[in-house]
Image: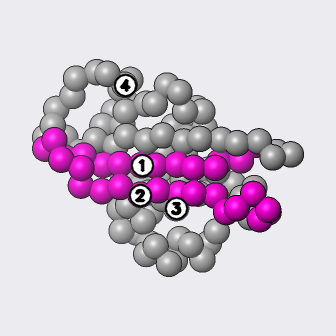
Amino acid sequence: MLVINDAETRDGFQHAVEGWLDSEEIRYVVKPEGVEHDPQQLTIEYVGYWSWDLALFLSRAEIEAFYQGQRVSKITYNAPSTLHTAKFGDADERIKLMLDVMFANKSLQEATDKL
């Protein structure tokens, strides 16, 4: 598996992705954006956005998987509304739940219940 490191996203996102892959014992290689890669290899791309509202929180995230030049999976996270305190949850955990859903380790409902 290939993971494309999004240079504009906070490093914690990449660390969460790698931590999840390590825990699942999935072999992977990390490459920077813009590097040519083998379309026969499953490729993960991500982007994460943080916002400030008395504290820093993950406000939006997207993880996509590509294989043979086609997107085969996409999962999106959007933080609850600005008045909802649940938005301050652990970003690392949210990223890992996104990957659990993407790789069918959890259902969307199971992941949502953990938020």
Q: Name the amino acid type tagged 3.
A: Leu
Element class at badge 4: loop
- The extreme front residue here reads 82
Across and down, in percent, residue 75 comes to 41, 57
Residue in the image at 30% along x and 37% along y: 2
Q: Name the amino acid type tagged 2.
A: Ile
Whether residue 18 is visible here, answered yes or no, is: no
Across and down, in percent, residue 69 comes to 16, 41
Q: Which residue is mark 3?
A: 97
Q: Residues within 10 Å of mark 1 (few under 14, many from 20)?
A: some
How much space separates mark 4 and mark 1, taking CA atoms? 14 Å
Dot 2 or dot 3: first in sequence order is 2
Q: Which mark is residue 63?
A: 1
Q: Which residue is mark 4?
A: 33
Element class at badge 1: strand
Residue in the image at 37% along x and 25% along y: 33
How much space separates mark 2 and mark 3, taking CA atoms? 10 Å
Q: Which residue is mark 2?
A: 75
Dot 2 or dot 1: first in sequence order is 1
Dot 2 or dot 4: first in sequence order is 4
Quadrant of image for the C terminus? bottom right
> Between tags 1 and 3, which lies in front?
1
Q: Are marks 2 and 4 in contact (CB under 8 Å)?
A: no
Q: Name the amino acid type tagged 4.
A: Glu
Q: Which residues are magenta?
A: 56-85
Q: Are marks 2 and 3 in contact (CB under 8 Å)?
A: no
